[in-house]
Amino acid sequence: MKNLKICHVDGLKQGNTPICGIYAFINGFYDGRNTEDWMALINYLWNLSIDGNLRKHSKNNTYSIAAHDLTYSTVGEFFSSDNLYSFLNSNKKSILPELQKIDSSIDTYDVNKISDIDFKDTEFKVDTFYIVPINSSEPFESNRSNMHWICVKRYMDEVIIVNSAKNYNGEINADIKSLRGLTKIKYLFQLNAVGRNMKKREHKGKTFNFIRWWKKEGRKIDRNIPNLKSNAQIISSASKFNYSFCCSNFDIIQIDITRK
């Protein structure tokens, strides 16, 4: 079972946006149709995800934020399994009708946090998918810390990964020896190793430097998302803005879809 082959399929791509968690969620539903409608829903979720109370976390224009300081996210990113779980679960009444407008067969969805995917059950439900956190930092860049979310689901008789990134660097940089020289995760043992690596990050106290990200990537983002504008201004004018990863245990998010 550990040598179970994993395939990749194309899904919706996030481009230059920091919202891979939202893309991983939508790619669990996406079947290649109604692309414009799904992209519009992603923008809706993006706006919904942004914490509107960021200013209360400031101390002399310096922000050192951990998962428990935020309701959901700062600019649509999710660095915490708890925050992503809470966002998808607490906002179900808002999200579900929008999903049903695009796919009327959806009755509801349920969200759970799990430690591991049970691949021993080779007949796991077609309408179950997983949002899996992976380490996407270059392993030798000690001053940089980042992460990425990928969608894992069943397609026909295969286990597949839908990666919203424009390339597979996040998978290559998952900081495990088994991925050196590969372009993507290809086997179950590699996916499991990536998961274990994320669990180890819980106690390392790594931080993400939003100021550095903003100068390099943030300014490129289309800021038509209403809630993004105010938080973008806070980040760009802050003297320090770091996010701590140490308060997340990086659980896998399991989504179960019930259809009518």
Image (cartoon, rainbow, N blue to C red):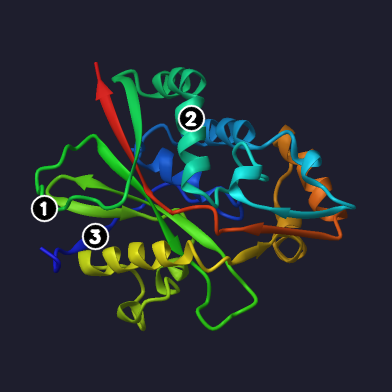
Label 2 SS: helix
Q: Amino acid at mark 3?
A: Cys
Image quarter hosting the C terminus:
top left
Is the Cβ of the residue at disc 1 closer than 8 Å to that at disc 2?
no
151 shown above or below 71: below
Cα distance between the residues tagged 1 and 3: 17 Å
Q: Residues within 10 Å of mark 1 (few under 14, many from 20)?
A: few
Instruction: Give the residue number, with chain letter if any, for mark 1.
Output: 120
Instruction: Give the residue number, with chain letter if any, for mark 2.
Output: 37
Q: Is residue 1 left or right of residue 23?
A: left
Q: Is residue 184 left or right of residue 120?
A: right
User: Which label's residue is closer to the chain start, 1 or 3?
Assistant: 3
Which residue appears at 55% of the width and 59% of the height?
246
Q: Residue furthest front?
A: 203
Q: Residues within 10 Å of mark 2 (few under 14, many from 20)?
A: few
Instruction: Give the residue number, with chain letter if any, for mark 3.
Output: 7
Q: Residues within 10 Å of mark 3 (few under 14, many from 20)?
A: some
Image quarter hosting the N terminus:
bottom left
Q: Is residue 230 left or right of residue 77?
A: right
Label 1 vs label 2, nearer the camera: 1
Q: Amino acid at mark 2?
A: Asp
Counting every numbered tag in the picture gives 3
Label 3 SS: strand
User: Which label's residue is closer to the chain start, 1 or 2?
Assistant: 2
Where residue 170 appears, x then y in whole percent? 46, 67
Which residue appears at 49% of the width and 34% of the height?
86
Between 148 and 28, the one lying in front of the other is 148
Q: Amino acid at mark 1?
A: Lys
